[in-house]
Amino acid sequence: MVTQNNALVSKLLTNVSNKFSPNNYISERILPTIKVIQTSGKLGGYKNEHLRIGTYIHSGDGPYPKVKLNNRKDQDYSLDKHALSGTVTEEDFKNVEAPFDAQKDETDDLTDLLWIEKEFGLATTLGDDTIYSSGHKVTLSGTDQYNDLANSTPLTDAIAARQAIASDTGTRPNIAIMNMEVFENLAINPSILDSLGYKDNRPGGLEMGELARAFKVDQIIIGEARANFAKQGQPDSLLPLWGKHVIFAVAPKSVAKRQVSLGYRIQTTTPRRVKVNNIDNPPNSIEVLIDDWYEQLIANIDAAYLIKEAIA
């Protein structure tokens, strides 16, 4: 007697797959972009000698009073090349089936790694209170933190931030940066709701534009990207790249001469250049190369104010 076994093969669904890809990266929205050819150079700027008060009355036939201002300054920049490569083998092309795509998956994963590095780099810099002067930072604790809805005073903190930046740069901040958790606490803060006339009729909390109006900035920028902070082999730990802070800043939409800006993203090429090479080791494989050549230059840290640990 012949026993017949029916082999059961579990097939992948071809039109759906699960994957978390970070979204709403904001590092390239905060710093205006300067495109350059050379990988190093200088960013020009001005001191404030042209703002000193004097008496400049001229009378009679004598010459006009002469001034000689040493008002120009510059700042060095040097770009780093951030680059990764990955190999897609002949076996990958043969064995990887829909919904997976061997080449696209490799390209997307490498791209995410470079994006996360850039985002984390700027978030870490702007969340580091040691780079700010004493008048441009505050660390909240206890009842001052914004998750304490009854006692915290975010509008008073916002006034301090705007005044500090205006005092040292002559320009008021136009953006406030935070992660979603901070925003959600601010969106239901009674003092902010009351200031906008919503104390008793806004059960769903504020929209981003309404919080911007309360903070007197043009835009609230929310950093939602997350990274896996767990060591390899350990359970995943997906945490926000932007900490529990609020950062007020002057961030122009584009580059221009004679303007105040927290900084610039100085870039040689379009972000994240992708190149694919055919390789013979292993045979019939391709190599995916991605690079991103930039510096996130903080040009004027006084154009920012850090409210650190805004929530617990």
Image (cartoon, rainbow, N blue to C red):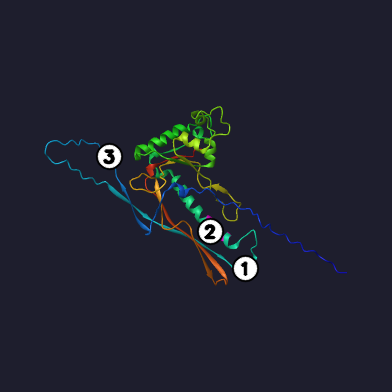
- Please state which amino acid type lies under the numbered disc 3: Leu
Give yes or no for contact between labels 2 and 1 (Cβ–Cβ under 8 Å).
Answer: no
Q: Which residue is depicted at the point 49% across and 53% down?
A: 117
Q: Is residue 81 above or below residue 65?
A: below
Q: Which residues are magenta?
A: 105-112
Choose between 220 and 70: the one closer to the eye.
220
Residue 36 percent across, percent down from the top left? 38, 57
Q: Is residue 23 left or right of residue 43?
A: right
- Please state which amino acid type lies under the numbered disc 2: Leu
According to the image, label 2 marks what residue?
110
Residue 15 percent across, percent down from the top left? 66, 56
Mark sitting on residue 91: 1
Question: Disc count in the image?
Answer: 3
Q: Say if the magenta span includes residue 122.
A: no
> Label 2 neighbourhood size at 10 Å, few (<14), some (14-19), many (20+)?
many
> Label 1 neighbourhood size at 10 Å, few (<14), some (14-19), many (20+)?
few
Give yes or no for contact between labels 3 and 1 (Cβ–Cβ under 8 Å).
Answer: no
Q: Which circle's residue, 3 or 2, is located before the other in the chain?
A: 3
According to the image, label 3 marks what residue?
51
